[in-house]
Amino acid sequence: MSSGPRFRFAPSPTGSFHVGGARTALHNWALARRLGGTFVLRIEDTDEARNRPEWTEGIIDALAWIGISADDPHFEGPHFQSGHADAHVAAAQRLHESGAAYYCDLTGQQVQDRAKELGITGYDGYSRDRGLEAGPGRVLRFRVPEGHTVVRDAVRGDVDFDNSTIEDFVLLRGNGTPMFLLANVVDDIEMQISDVVRAEEHLPNTPKQQMLWEALGHDAPRWAHVPVLVNEQRKKLSKRRDKVALESYRDEGILADAMVNYLMTLGWTPPRSEELGSEIFTWSELEDEFRLEDVTLSPAFFDVKKLVAFNKQYIKNMPIAAFLDAVDSELPDGWDRARFAAIAPHIVERLERLGDAPGVVDFLFLPDGTDPEIDAASWDKATKPEWSAALLSDVIEAYGSLDTDSWSTDVLKTTMEDLMGRYEIKLGKAQALPRVAVTGRSVGPPLFEALEVLGQAETVRRLQVAATILRSDAATD
Ligand code: GLU
């Protein structure tokens, strides 16, 4: 075991893996690695009604996808909380024996009725001095001491809780099973966790957990509560309202590096970003620079548009071989990979997601002799100028008579430039109709590069089909 600090990530496998969880995991991972410590993965699977094994697998896969690999020497686990129930109960018994906890036989309803009668909220400490022993239906409650609990938080500084606002909370349910607060602390103690870095929503639990650490004879860990992620309406991201599952972003073609960079820079800016004038960082830069003290206190807006913009940058900057590898699963099985590789360098700049690639180049993969589907609005616009039919027949003539060996991007471009002179138009205008004729659309990859890949015979054939349609349109007008 490494002698460095011990961090942990302790998800409950009760649904698909949330982007907020991924961010917490990355924070812990960055710190454990930079400080030469350990990242402990603990699956908090004690809620039997809500846990499913496939969700645990989903967490491990998702962590691996964002670079938190179980093979890394800093990684420990997974540990499963359900395997430690005996330790949780034993700790509860020790607390009972020392007087730090006591049994109470009131039902939930009775607690509520008393609170109403007394005009208070929560539990009033009714059984504190009744000396009850364990028994069916009896819950074990922690005896919250008087005074204040100060939580030292690396993100928020000291947070002072008045213990009089904290009720004697339940450690063991009436059926003897441990509550989250207890199980989480006992596991952290057993796993010698030194640093608890987690989402802000757990801050209200922290004074209670700190009291438990102390009552069990240990110094509390260093705490850090990182602000939650919110949506455009500044509401906490929720499974019902927002797309929060990490794998849904993976499945739609967001790259892991883009996701990691984006999540890490939510609510935190690497100090060097100003100097570098960039928001794009490698993992090792992020890991070197991440400090909890620099995380902002306000909730961070999880902006899908910005994530997509990051992704676009990453796709553009990928070595082409890596791009071909990553995009492969997005391409239809029958597509000629060599043909795709020929056009790939010319499309990477325009892709927001890997999954956009097939739609951008599909016109190159129609069986020879198949006409692309022509977008009507693009066609109307491209055929409007009165010179369009004449230019098209000039292009057919010029491209058709090129030597097959000279069929290349450069020659196609200069040939078109020569023709433009006759019509006194710019290249963009001259390309419009050939582009629609060959690709079916008015936007797409650079035209001459695409024509080179498509080849002379099929290019000229599609241009001729367009010329025929134009003539028949003219005849019926
Ligand atoms: N299982 C808890 C959760 O997923 C863990 C909280 C913690 O990190 O302490 O919210």
Image (cartoon, rainbow, N blue to C red):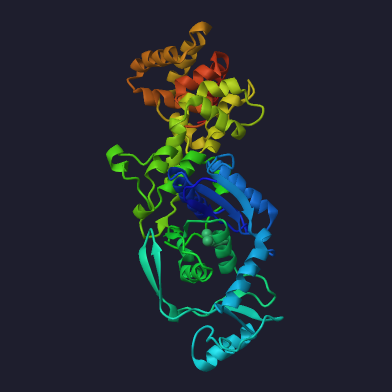
Give residue 211's position: percent from left, percent from top: 48, 71
**295 up-or-down from 123: above or below:** above
Return the residue found at the far right. Answer: 136
Is residue 158 depicted above or below 77 in this figure?
below
Task: Look at the picture and state if 321 lies above or below 83.
Answer: above
The answer to which quarter of the image holds residue 276 is top left
Furthest residue in direction left, as rendered: 275
In this rendering, is residue 9 above or below 275?
below
| 254 relative position to 427: left or right | right
Q: From the top left corner, tell me how far across and down residue 136 is, in percent.
A: 72, 81
Instruction: Specify the quadrant of the image occupied by residue 459.
Output: top right
Q: Is residue 239 visible?
A: no
Give me the residue at 52% from left, 29% from top.
323
Judge whether residue 87 can be spotted in this image.
Answer: yes
In this orientation, which residue lies closer to the viewer: 1 or 68? 1
Q: Residue 235 in the image: x percent, y percent?
A: 45, 63
Q: Quadrant of ligand 1?
A: bottom right
Residue drawn at x 53%, y 79% is 143
Image label count:
0
Give the residue displayed 33% in from the left and 39% down from the top.
278
**Camera-side residue: 271 or 342?**
271
Name the residue at 42% across, 42% down.
Answer: 287
- Left or right, 190 with respect to 24, comes to right
Residue 25 coordinates in the image, percent (x, y): 51, 51
**Camera-side residue: 85 or 179?**
85
